[in-house]
Image (cartoon, helix red, strand yellow):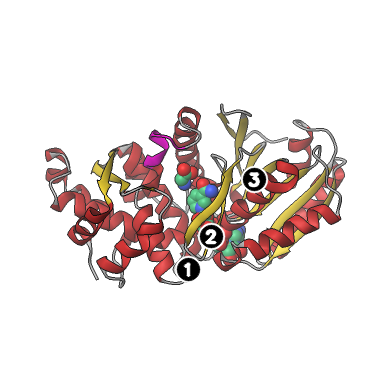
Amino acid sequence: MAEYRQIPVNTDPAYTVTIGPGLLKDCGPRLRAIMNPCRMAVVTDNTVAPLYLDTVLQSLAASGFDAFSVTFPAGEGSKNFTTLSAILERLAAERLTRSDCVIALGGGVVGDMAGFAAACYLRGIRYVQMPTTLLAAVDSSVGGKTAIDLAAGKNLAGAFLQPAAVLCDTDCLKTLPPEIFADGAAEAVKTGVLTSPELFALFESGNLTAMPEEAIAQCVAYKAGVVERDEREQGERKLLNLGHTIGHAIEKCSGYTIPHGHAVAAGLAIMARSAAALGEMTPAAIERRDAERICATLSRLGLPISTEYPPDALAGAALSDKKRSGDSITIVIPQEIGQCRLNSIPVGALLFTIRAGWRA
Ligand code: NAD
Ligand code: GLY
């Protein structure tokens, strides 16, 4: 087997994120190295299935796994109880047991759906993440958050369940349409703003399409550390929600027609401008024009930095956000590129924060 980048995630259970080209055709032996032959339910969507499902099924069969597929229509519109119920009924019809396994082959929607199904079925069975979008590679396949959307808002029903392994085949990124690649870039830029000016520089002036492995490895390594220290989002992990309170509100206002990454980009831009306008940025960040650099980098990557939905609509949509606790809500404030902080504010103050950075 070829050598790939490997990043350990020391949660309970611990697992490894393996990153590199051509991994899907190697997935059987890779999984055989960490589990006995078993039944495998490969959950995917109808865009990913024709591209990668056969490769995965063949590799699993060649390594002694008895695999079948469960496919649902692609898109955020499928992240609901109807799809969850169909997956669970299929797992039961196939008589999967607790020694069997679910595979999430796809982007963040497939990862969230398959992961939540694995967390519910028989009160929890193993699952493996095989991310095929940049967003899933840099963010959603790692950390064990799974969820579906409710009418009241985004990701409102879900569970924490760490995967048994993450196999990230970077060849999959070659078939992504540019706008879906850009969705992943939004979460990657978020990570750069959270953690390191050097990582941010990769996105500000580098060629992300030409070197996704380095960006993925750095984003995963950062996220792995945060998740190890705060698996259940009691504190530090909340930082990963930078741009997400407004991002989720934009998704909800659009009826989920604006994709997650695009919404997060606009949310991040609003938070960056707001921090600069309200004196939350450090003097060095103001001098370096960090807020403008964040917005310019998002634009350079083909992402929006504004939204048509007015501040009061966004603040209203954010009232059902998971990050609300009673009458307060925790927001993530970018102080400079590479440094952010959490701030718990009264729900009523969110409108003021949004207004300060909002652009049509
Ligand atoms: P997605 O899963 O909907 O994928 C976007 C589109 O790309 C889909 O149509 C899909 O079929 C297609 N696609 C996937 N791989 C492809 C490939 N290799 N080639 C061509 N087309 C491909 O969206 P996403 O941006 O990957 O994920 C967004 C979701 O992730 C949101 O629901 C968001 O809430 C969730 N998310 C979860 C976490 C977490 O920690 N659990 C973190 C961030 C985001
Ligand atoms: N994407 C945010 C988290 O995993 O916590």
Q: Residue furthest front?
A: 326
- Amino acid type at circle 2 is Asp
Compare marks 3 and 1 and give the one earlier in the sequence: 3
Q: Are the residues at dot 1 and dot 2 in contact (C-beta closer than 8 Å)?
A: yes
**Residue 232 location, x and y as percent?**
50, 36
Q: Which residue is mark 3?
A: 129
Asked if the stretch drawn in magenta spans residue 237, the answer is yes
* Residue at x 42%, y 48% (from the top left corner): 188
Q: CA distance from mark 2 to mark 3?
A: 20 Å
Q: Which residue is mark 2?
A: 149
Query: Position of 349 compared to 36: left or right?
Result: left
Q: Is mark 3 within 8 Å of ligand 1?
A: no
Q: Is the C-beta separation of discs 3 and 1 under 8 Å?
A: no
Could you tell me how far apart the alpha carbons at marks 1 and 2 are, in whole angstroms?
10 Å
Residue 256 numbered mark, or none: 1
Which percent across, then down, holds residue 246?
Answer: 34, 58
Circle 1 crowding by C-alpha within 10 Å: few under 14, some 14–19, many from 20: some
The residue at 80%/41% (across/down) is 100
Type of the residue with mark 1: Tyr
Q: Which one is earlier in the sequence, the residue at label 1 or at label 2? A: 2
Given the image, on which type of amino acid does mark 3 rest? Answer: Gln
Looking at the rendering, the stretch of residues picked out in magenta corresponds to 233-239
Instruction: Pinpoint residue 185: horizontal percent, then vertical percent.
Output: 43, 54
Residue found at x 35% / y 47%: 326
Name the residue nearer the viewer: 19 or 242. 242
Query: Which secondary structure, mark 3?
Result: strand
Residue 346: image location, x then y, percent: 25, 49
Q: Is mark 2 within 8 Å of ligand 1?
A: yes
Look at the image and tell me in which quarter the C terminus lies: bottom left
Which element carries disc 1, helix, strand or loop? Answer: loop
The mark tally for this picture is: 3
Residue 175 seen: no
